[in-house]
Image (cartoon, rainbow, N blue to C red):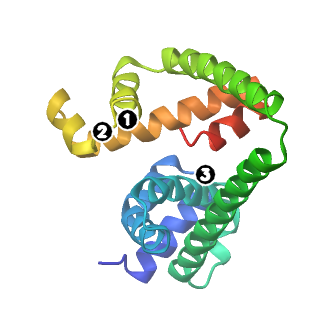
Amino acid sequence: MYLQKDSEKELLRQVAAGSHQAFEQLFLEYKDRVYHVAGLYSKDDTIAEEIVQEVFLTVWKKRESLEELDDFRSWLFILSRNQVIKYLEKWANNKALEHAWGSQAGPTQPITEIAQHQEQLLLVLNEALLSLPQQQRMVFSLAKQEKLSYEAIADRLGISVLTVKTHMQRARQGIRSYLKQRGDLFIILFILMNY
């Protein structure tokens, strides 16, 4: 069920005014629809989750213009679709870059450089993980290092799947913030390693 047009307009007005509570309500109202669109286009749950984060980050950044929208739902759909396209283009470019590195590189030096950068990134990632709250760190490690599903993590930790997803989103945000403080190289490597 969509929000009534008047209720939606009022909610958008509050978000435009900077209300975090209204933004959270908007997020809860539309996040599943954005996730559905992202999943349809990307065919990947992890990518879909990333898209949801990026879309709502964009909504927040553009909040002051939300009141001017005639059709928020259509705008959100187009934003979601465009974000998926952007994400997939970036992924394709990264793969092409990896392929170019592999085919144009000399036999040892680039591989050694990549290995050094990966080693350096892993050290920084470990620092980033240590900066996270314990529950987020545990959920992230189980998902990324032990390759457990959200359901398996929920069973192991005795928490809901929704709580696992929330911890994962916050862990990713925390890691990204930490890496941004360290510089662009770390972010590029983070994306290339698809961590």
The answer to whether marks 1 and 2 mark residues whose Cβ atoms lie closer than 8 Å is: yes
Q: Using the rendered view, name the quadrant where residue 69 is placed.
A: bottom right
Task: From the image, tell me which residue sits under label 2.
Answer: 164
Which circle's residue, 2 or 3, is located before the other in the chain? 3
Q: Secondary structure at mark 1?
A: helix
Which circle's residue, 1 or 3, is located before the other in the chain? 3
Q: x and y percent of residue 17 in the render? A: 62, 56
Task: From the image, tell me which residue sits under label 1.
Answer: 167
- Report the Cα–Cα distance between label 2 and label 3: 28 Å
Name the residue: 57% across, 74% down.
Answer: 81
Relative horizontal placement of residue 44, taking residue 74 as reference (left or right): left
Task: From the image, tell me which residue sits under label 3.
Answer: 18
User: The N terminus appears in which quarter of the rendering?
Assistant: bottom left
Q: Amino acid at mark 3?
A: Gly
Q: x and y percent of residue 82 in the render? A: 63, 72
- Crowding at mark 3 (Cα within 10 Å: few <14, some 14-19, many 20+): some
Name the residue: 18% across, 34% down.
Answer: 159
What number is the disc on residue 125? none
Q: x and y percent of residue 38 in the render? A: 47, 68
- Report the Cα–Cα distance between label 1 and label 3: 25 Å
Q: Using the rendered view, name the quadrant where residue 60 is placed.
A: bottom right
Q: Using the rendered view, name the quadrant where residue 191 is placed.
A: top right
Depth check: 117 or 18 in front?
117
